[in-house]
């Protein structure tokens, strides 16, 4: 199973998923740009490394848009942090969306969803896990009653939150 810690693994994944208009980016090799991004990731072919380097400072924690998944019809799932500079937001948003649109075989428009508004943040998820763990722990032994109980509760909690915000 690939770890995706080498460009060749990303290249194989791009070919496997038919994401021909996407490429491996190595601007974070050695984690020189961001410790929270992988060394290698996938971006639209039309976004040059030089452009991405210029855009970095405008994204929260330098987390520029990167490809996560591709549907057989060419639609892609892309994640990114928010743009931290309101003066640059419109310009960058247009540039990134244009690049993603060019990466789709039918040039379909980008559908954006701000997950910061719709889903809990990592701190909320951690707090929910701690609460669920407290419910499922037996006395002082700290043994879980049932791992399935925890999985069901967490799944229902976040699935319900997603439905409420959709």
Image (spheres, rainbow, N blue to C red):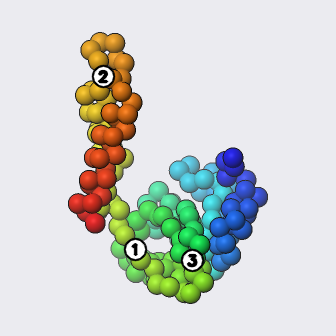
Q: Residue furthest left?
A: 164
Q: Which residue is mark 3?
A: 73
Question: For this view, does 135 lie left or right of residue 90?
Answer: left
As rendered, which of 127 and 29 lies closer to the eye? 127
Q: Which mark is residue 137?
A: 2
Within 10 Å of disc 3 (Cα), the crowding (few <14, some 14-19, many 20+) is few
Quarter of the image for residue 112 reads bottom left
Question: For this view, does 70 lie left or right of residue 6?
Answer: left
Q: Position of residue 103 (x, y in %)?
A: 59, 80
Residue at 68% across, 75% down: 20
Residue at 58% across, 76% down: 74
Local secondary structure at mark 2: strand
Residue 51 appears in the rendering:
no
Q: CA distance from mark 1 to mark 3?
A: 18 Å
Residue at 56% across, 87% down: 106
Q: Position of residue 64 (x, y in %)?
A: 52, 65
């Amino acid at each position: 199973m690939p770890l995706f810690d080498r460009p060749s693994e990303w290249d194989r994944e791009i070919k496997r998923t038919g994401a021909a208009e996407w490429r491996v980016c190595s601007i974070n090799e050695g984690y020189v740009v961001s410790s929270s991004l992988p060394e290698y990731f996938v971006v639209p072919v039309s976004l040059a490394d030089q452009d991405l380097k210029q855009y970095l400072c405008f994204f929260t924690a330098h987390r520029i848009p990167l490809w996560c998944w591709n549907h057989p019809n060419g639609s892609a799932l892309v994640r990114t942090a928010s743009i931290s500079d309101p003066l640059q937001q419109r310009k960058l948003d247009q540039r990134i969306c244009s690049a993603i649109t060019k990466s789709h075989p039918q040039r379909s428009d980008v559908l954006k969803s701000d997950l910061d508004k719709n889903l809990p943040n990592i701190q909320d998820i951690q707090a929910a896990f701690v609460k669920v763990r407290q419910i499922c722990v037996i006395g002082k032994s700290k043994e879980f009653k049932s791992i399935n109980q925890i999985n069901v509760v967490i799944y229902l909690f976040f699935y319900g939150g997603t439905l409420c915000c959709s």
